[in-house]
Image (cartoon, rainbow, N blue to C red):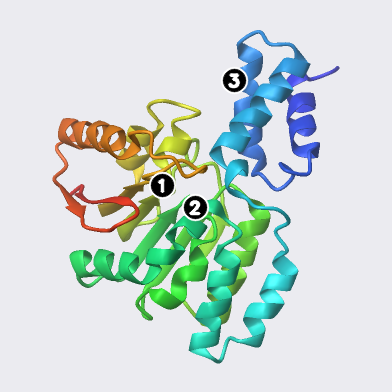
Amino acid sequence: MPDPLNDLTAAVLAGPKYAAIVPELARRLAAAELAKGRSPKEALKATRNKLHQVGGAYLGGRMDYPDWADRLAAVSADPAALQAECRAILAAHASSRERLPILDDFYAAIFAALGPVNSVLDVACGLNPLTLPWLPPDLTYYGVDIYTDMTAFCDEFRARLGRPGRVWAADVLAQPPDTAVDVAFVFKTLPCLEQVDKDAGRTLLRALNAARLVVSFPVTSLGGRAKGMPANYAARFEALAAAEGWPIQPLNITGELVYLVEKG
């Protein structure tokens, strides 16, 4: 017999922009749209719109992972050339591209505030694993995102550098990662997840198996407009942290709103 949810999920993943999305996320969002009584055509459009909001909007053009892997391998023995190649590839993802002008200061400020750290989980990491050359060399790095091809590429890069850890694909709201780490990075992620579920931020942060979090928010839209975003995000997040009883410390980083959170 026909299965509307199976058919809709397959249709969502058939689109080239969504083929590498972790299937569990596509299925969950498709089920939510069908539950609203939408027609298959309406549900397909709505599901793809949600996936665009949580991930697709940040990808720029063709993500040529095989070529990128070759380029990185060619410079892997030259630290300066490797950082330069990583910067060039990071520009393909809108979130990491915004951070390129402050990349050195960004991680310097974070690790100065954190002190010694042995392990990190990077939630909705995107291409962030390519910033491993800026992170402490003995750090165990875990990253998770919704794209199967992106995470495979990033995990290959991590392994080539000889860094312990793992990068994998998952629907972090349905399956919050339970990897125990010293700190979890949640960079510019909560606004995207809250496009799907307004309580997603609170749910995810509670679930993460880390005593400390570094949570950040964008200060402008993808189009470069501020639109009161820093004040709005600051008010909402500080209220969330206060309600949870989590002490927070704003970090002085130009270009991104960043908090160190003590979950305990």
Residue at (61%, 87%) from the top-left corner?
75
Where residue 116 appears, as percent x and y from the top left, is 22, 72
Rounded to the nearest angstrom, the CA distance separating label 1 from label 2 is 8 Å
Q: Which residue position holds label 1?
A: 188
Disc 2 or 3, which lies upstream in sequence? 3
Residue 56 position within the rendered picture, expressed as x and y whole percent measured from the top left: 62, 42
Where is 97 relative to 8, above or below? below
Secondary structure under badge 1?
A: loop
- Disc 2 is placed on an element classified as helix
Residue nearer the viewer, 117 or 59? 59
Label placed on residue 14: none
Can see residue 164?
Answer: no
Q: Amino acid at mark 3?
A: Ala
Q: Which residue is mark 3?
A: 32
Mark 3 neighbour density, 10 Å: few (under 14) some (14–19) many (20 or more): some
Q: What x and y, as percent, mark residue 149?
A: 68, 57
Q: Is residue 251 above or below residue 36?
A: below
